[in-house]
Image (tube, rainbow, N blue to C red):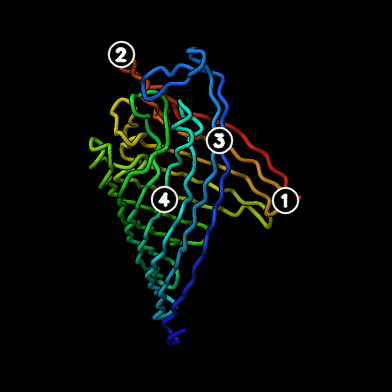
Amino acid sequence: SLTDALNITLGGRLSQDEKDFSLTTTGTEIGFGQLTPDPETGIIGPFSASDDESWSDFTPKVSLEYTSSDELFLYATYAKGFKSGGYNGLATDSGAATTPFDQEEVDSYEVGLKADFFENLMRLNVAAYYMDYVDLQVFLAAPGGIGFVVENAGEATIQGLELELFVSPLDGLDFSATYSYIDSNIDEFEGRPELVGNNLSRTPENSASLSAQYIAPLGDQLSLLMRADYSYQDKIFLDIGNSSISAADSYELVNVRLALQSEGVWEVALWGRNITDEEYRVHALDSTFGGNASAATIIGDPSMWGVTASYFF
C-alpha cells in the first residue's frame, strides 16, 4: 500500500516449456504443392518425423489501484503474456513437420473504473484496453493451399472498450446491459503481405447484451423467477484471411426462462433459447475448390424449448 487509498501490486512468472514431437502418417507426403517421392524407391508414400524444442519467457505484471470511497474504484494494469511455440501435427511433409512455429508474446495494458450509485442500486464498470502481439500464432491454409498449419504473424494489435451497467430499482428486479467495441489488426506478416491490415478472427467490432430478471415471492419458501436475455454480435471473420465465404454475419439472439423455485431445495423451469429462430454461423471453413466457392459450416442451435427439473441435495 502506498497510501490508504492507493495500492500497487507487482508480480512475475518465469515459464519454461519443453516439447517432444513425433508424427507418423499413412498418407502421401506433399512438399509445398509438389509430390515428394521416396528417395530409394521413387514411390510416393507416408513419412515419419520427430523433433524437440524448448521455449521460455519471463512475464511481469504491474497493477495500480485507487479507491477514493466505497463507491469508486480505479485501476491501471500492465501485464505480459506468453504462449509457447509448437509443431504442426497437420504438416504435409517431414520438413514442415520438424519446423516449429515460434512462441507468442503480448504486452497488455488496461485502465478502468467500477462505480456504485444510489446506495448500490446501480453499478457501472468501464474498461479500455490495448494489446500488442509479437509472433501471434494464427491458423491458416498452408503455402500452396494444401492443408492447414499454425504460423506466426509478425505483429498484431487489439484495442477496445467494454461497458457494463447493472441496475436494481426494486427488490427482486434486476436489469443489466453490456457493450463491447473491438478494433483488431494484423500489422506485419512476413511472407504473407496479403494478410496485413486484416482483422483477427472472431473479433466482432460491436457486441451488446440486455437482460431483465424479476423474482416474485409466492410464500415463505416459493418464488417465481422470470428472465429474458437479448444479445447482439457484429459480423466476424472466422479465418485470418478474412474470407467473405466463411464469415459469420451479424445476428441477434433472445432467450427466456420461467422457473418455480423452492429456495435451496428444488426448481422446475420452462426455458426457450433463440426463440426468434435466428440462423447464424458458429464456425465455417473456406472449402473452395476450383471454381466452386463454398464453406464447410456449423450452424448455431435453432429455436429450442424445454423443461428442466432440479433437486438440490
| Residue kind at label 4, given as amino acid type | Glu
Q: Give the structural element (helix, strand or loop) at label 1.
A: loop
Q: Is residue 195 left or right of residue 175?
A: left
* Of labels 4 and 1, the one closer to you: 4
| Residue kind at label 3, given as amino acid type | Ser
Q: CA distance from mark 1 to mark 2?
A: 60 Å
Image-quadrant location for residue 249? top left
Q: Position of residue 66 (x, y in %)?
A: 40, 78
Mark sitting on residue 50 = 3
| Residue kind at label 1, given as amino acid type | Val
Residue visible at 52% across and 29% down in the picture: 304
Mark 2 and mark 4 lie on one chain; the one further toward the N terminus is: 4
Q: Is residue 282 above or below residue 130?
A: above
Q: Is residue 221 visible?
A: yes
Q: CA distance from mark 4 to mark 3?
A: 22 Å
**Which residue sits furthest right?**
313
| Front residue (pair 40, 22) | 40
Mark 2 lies on residue: 290
Q: Position of residue 172 (x, y in %)?
A: 52, 58
Q: CA distance from mark 3 to mark 1?
A: 56 Å
Mark 1 lies on residue: 265
Mark 4 lies on residue: 104
**Which residue sits furthest front?**
40
* Of labels 1 and 2, the one closer to you: 2
Mark 4 and mark 1 lie on one chain; the one further toward the N terminus is: 4
Q: CA distance from mark 2 to mark 4?
A: 34 Å
